[in-house]
Amino acid sequence: MYKKSAFLIAPALALAVVSLSGAGAMAADNGTTTYQANLGAINGSNATGSVMISLTGDQATVTENVSGLAATFNGAPYPHVQHIHIDGKGVCPTPAADTNKDGVISTTEGGPSYGKIGTTLSTSGDTSDKAALDLKVAGMGASYSYQRTFAMNAETIAALKAGTGVVVVHGLDPATLPAAAQKEKSDLVPSLPLAATSPALCGTVVASQMGAMPGGAPGTGLTQTAQATTGASPELGLFAGAGALVLAAGAFVALRRTKTASN
């Protein structure tokens, strides 16, 4: 009886192996590569998140869930600009990156670790570095889900393939910064407080064999979905298009004053 069962099981196992091998080959042959990143908190944000990027040619579908970010400013959802950074070391900055020892890793202090902006994860329109600080197309609020398909520029694609792409979400609650840092101005837009543009979440993008979102907190707040767009610019820089944030300077200052008054 045992020998008969063994002879029956062996072909079944062989068939299963062949089937799994075939599935792997199909996944490789369809031209789509999947990348993922677990987003960890920076600067004491206590936020979490996850990102998945499905890339076919230059068409990228980015799916992101985040939670625990700064929630509001001036009575409106807090705008969190977010990007895929490239051409750095491909890692998130450690506390040692805080070179001026103010207790906050600013965007420029983190630059050597994660590099310059390759792609802006905007909700609509431009995905180049020119949209880097456009608050109107930023992630909004403490928790949100983001999904968008767009043409990704060649330099960002190269960084993903090389394992040096890093997703960074910016924007901190000014009240959570050390007292001295609360009085500092942004290293990118001096009319804004340091909190407005400093990184809150960071994660290195790695190739994935799975077709599901990586571990991380699910988005439980605002859901933002944007449809396909084309013509993403390959022009790169650490930050550009600061005008949109300059317009919001008064709102961020009001937030800081409100926090101070409430304390």
Image: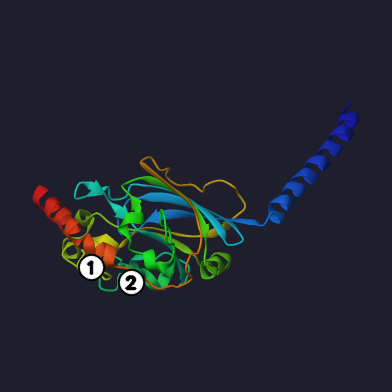
Q: Amino acid at mark 2?
A: Thr
Q: Quadrant of residue 132?
A: bottom left
Q: Real-space Cα distance between discs 1 and 2? A: 14 Å
- The answer to whether residue 209 is left or right of residue 137 is right
- The answer to whether residue 37 is left or right of residue 241 is right
The residue at the far left in this view is 261
Q: Is residue 97 visible?
A: no
Answer above or below: position of 223 versus 136: above
Answer above or below: position of 45 versus 234: above
Q: Position of residue 181 (x, y in %)?
A: 20, 64
For disc 2, the neighbor class at 10 Å (few under 14, some 14 to 19, many from 20) is many
Q: Position of residue 5 (x, y in %)?
A: 86, 30
- The answer to whether residue 58 is left or right of residue 105 is right
Q: Position of residue 216 (x, y in %)?
A: 45, 47
Residue with the mark numbered 1 = 102
Point out the frontmost of discs 1 and 2. Answer: 2
As helix, strand or loop, the secondary structure at mark 2 comes to helix
Question: Mark 1 near mark 2, Cβ–Cβ under 8 Å?
Answer: no
As helix, strand or loop, the secondary structure at mark 1 comes to loop
Q: Position of residue 161 (x, y in %)?
A: 58, 66
Residue pictured at 30% horizontal, 69% vertical:
98
Check residue 108 in the rendering and tell me which mark sits there, or answer none: 2
Residue pictured at 21% horizontal, 57% vertical:
174
Colouring of the image: rainbow
